[in-house]
Amino acid sequence: QVQLVESGGGLVQPGGSLRLSCAASGFTFRRAAMSWLRQTPGKERELVATISSASGSRNYADSVKGRFTISRDNAKNTMYLQMNSLKAEDTAVYYCNAKAGWLEYWGQGTQVTVSS
């Protein structure tokens, strides 16, 4: 059974930091391209960051470049998103996504709220 379980969300003040984790199981993690996406009510899901399976190359949305860092630990079947200098507009539900060949998997999401 495939599972993607996000954790690490919560309430943080503007300028603060959070680290999200996505624990994967049920598929060959090291062969999957992994991504973080986020969504706010009434808006489409937005791609935040992607890390490839092979080279580990990374891509970021312009809105998070220089503030967020995506990483993965294939030994632990886990992906991370380090979020620094958080802004109110980063408030969203953050989802973990895995693409392995023609298969695609989603986590249940974790809420991140940036507010004073």
Image (spheres, rainbow, N blue to C red):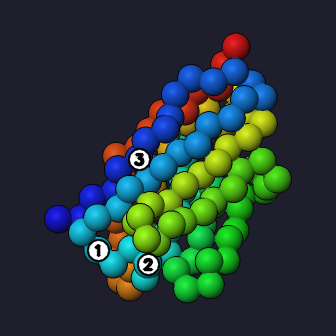
The residue carrying mark 3 is 6
Q: Quadrant of the N terminus?
A: bottom left
Looking at the image, which residue is at 50% across and 35% down?
9
Task: Give the number of the disc on residue 30.
Answer: 2
Q: Quadrant of the C terminus?
A: top right
Q: Amino acid at mark 1?
A: Phe
The residue carrying mark 1 is 27
62 horizontally vs 98: left or right: right
Q: Amino acid at mark 2?
A: Arg
Most extreme residue toward the top, as rendered? 116
Where is residue 37? Give x, y as percent: 54, 53
Circle 3 or circle 2, nearest the eye: 2
Looking at the image, which residue is at 52% across and 28% down?
10
Pointer 1 with pointer 3, Cβ within 8 A:
no
Would residue 48 be seen by someone viewing this image from the given angle? Answer: yes
CA separation in Å, label 1 and label 3: 16 Å
Where is residue 33? Give x, y as percent: 50, 75
CA separation in Å, label 3 and label 2: 17 Å
Disc 2 residue crowd, few under 14, some 14–19, many 20+, Cα 10 Å: some
Where is residue 115? Give x, y as percent: 66, 19
Which one is earlier in the sequence, the residue at label 3 or at label 2?
Answer: 3
